[in-house]
Amino acid sequence: MSVSDKLKHAAHDAKGKAKEAAGKVTGNTDMQAEGQADQGEAQAAHAADKAKDSAKNLGAGVKGKAKEVGGALTDDEGTEAKGKAEELAARAKQKLNK
């Protein structure tokens, strides 16, 4: 998930919180509900982006592992090392995504 996506989701969430607060203060239940809905949309979009990144990182890890195993089977140390590096990079990205 890009930084701009994170900022966009945070801004949408903040807008929702402001709407909800304004609705509470003014007694406007419609505005309060809109604010809660905006927050829910922002949280859902954030979760969807995280899931997309998780799937992408998982795929990269599997690809790296396959390359590592292929290198080991063919005694190609370069391919084996490259695959291991790709797998480790995917794991690191996955941990950062949490």
Image (cartoon, rainbow, N blue to C red):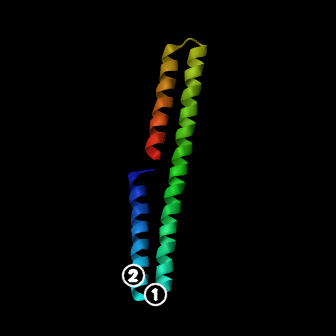
Q: Amino acid at mark 1?
A: Asn
> Which residue is at a point 47% across and 82% down the rendered structure image?
31
Residue at the disc numbered 1 = 28
Q: Position of residue 12 (x, y in %)?
A: 43, 67
Q: For the residue labelled by badge 2, is the local secondary structure a helix, a strand or a loop? A: helix
> Which residue is at a point 38% across and 52% down the rendered structure image?
3
Q: Amino acid at mark 2?
A: Ala
The relative height of residue 63 versus residue 23 in the rendered view (above or below) is above
Mark count: 2
> Which residue is at a point 51% across and 51% down the rendered structure image?
50
Q: Position of residue 98 (x, y in %)?
A: 47, 47
Residue found farthest to the top: 75
Left or right: residue 80 versus residue 22 is right
The relative height of residue 28 versus residue 65 in the rendered view (above or below) is below
Pick the front one: 18 or 8: 18
Disc 1 to disc 2, how far (Cα)?
A: 8 Å
Label 1 CA crowd tier, 10 Å (few <14, some 14–19, many 20+): some
Quadrant of residue 18 in the image?
bottom left
> Which residue is at a point 46% across and 46% down the rendered structure image?
97
Dot placed on the residue nearer the N-terminal end, 1 or 2: 2
Label 2 CA crowd tier, 10 Å (few <14, some 14–19, many 20+): some
The relative height of residue 57 versus residue 31 in the rendered view (above or below) is above
Quadrant of residue 48 in the image?
bottom right
Residue at the disc numbered 2 = 22
Numbered mark located on residue 5 in the image: none
Tag 1 and tag 2, C-beta contact below 8 Å: yes
Q: For the residue labelled by badge 1, is the local secondary structure a helix, a strand or a loop? A: loop
Q: Position of residue 64 (x, y in %)?
A: 54, 29
